[in-house]
Image (cartoon, rainbow, N blue to C red):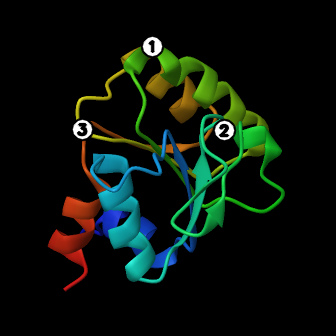
């Protein structure tokens, strides 16, 4: 019997830092994060442009977050991913989730080489819905 690493991750994770989380309810990052929050995950916004989103204080960088992060969920352009990966490696974050259309093979490989589980070009909401019925 093979295990499903994405299902295992979604079951074990409690805290998701969302890089690029907007405070605009019309943006995909907001809707996806609101869904995950409504399913019991602690959402930590990472966006220097907003002070808070979804009732949570926003941080300028992953490095500013004072608590343990289980998943870094990325809603940024692919060219922003290498810096995010460097921060995730520094923090020893167990998982990096690059949302749909966010693809950066080199940075993803660097994260994997550092022991980080990587999901790329997938929507965390869709994967949660599919697996967590």
Q: State which quadrant residue 46 falls in.
A: top right
- Which of the 4 image quarters holds residue 42? bottom right
How far apart are the two marked residues, 3 and 1, measured between alpha carbons?
14 Å
Mark 3, residue position: 100
Please name the residue that numbered disc 1 is placed on.
79
How many C-alpha atoms fall within 10 Å of the one at disc 2: few (<14), some, or many (≥20)? many
**Residue nearest the observer in this picture, 5 or 126:** 126
Q: Is residue 47 left or right of residue 109?
A: right
Q: Earlier in the sequence, mark 3 or mark 1?
A: 1
On the image, the x and y values in percent for residue 1 come to 22, 75
Q: Residue at x 27, y 51 (%)?
A: 26
Residue named by callout 2: 88
Dot placed on the residue nearer the N-terminal end, 2 or 1: 1
Name the element at disc 1. helix
Q: Nearer the N terminus, badge 3 or badge 2?
A: 2
Query: Which of labels 2 and 1 is toward the front?
Result: 1
- The reply to whether residue 1 is visible in this rendering is no
């Amino acid at each position: 019997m093979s295990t499903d690493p994405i299902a295992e991750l979604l079951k074990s994770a409690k805290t998701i830092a969302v890089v690029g989380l907007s405070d605009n309810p019309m943006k995909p990052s907001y809707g996806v994060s609101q869904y995950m929050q409504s399913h019991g995950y602690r959402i930590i916004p990472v966006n220097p442009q907003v002070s808070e989103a979804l009732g949570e204080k926003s941080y300028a960088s992953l490095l500013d977050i004072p608590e343990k992060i289980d998943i870094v969920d990325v809603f940024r352009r692919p060219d922003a991913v290498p810096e995010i990966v460097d921060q995730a490696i520094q923090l020893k974050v167990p998982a990096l989730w690059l949302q749909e259309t966010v693809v950066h093979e080199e940075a993803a490989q660097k994260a994997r080489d550092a022991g980080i589980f990587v999901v790329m070009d997938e929507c965390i909401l869709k994967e949660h819905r599919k697996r967590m019925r």
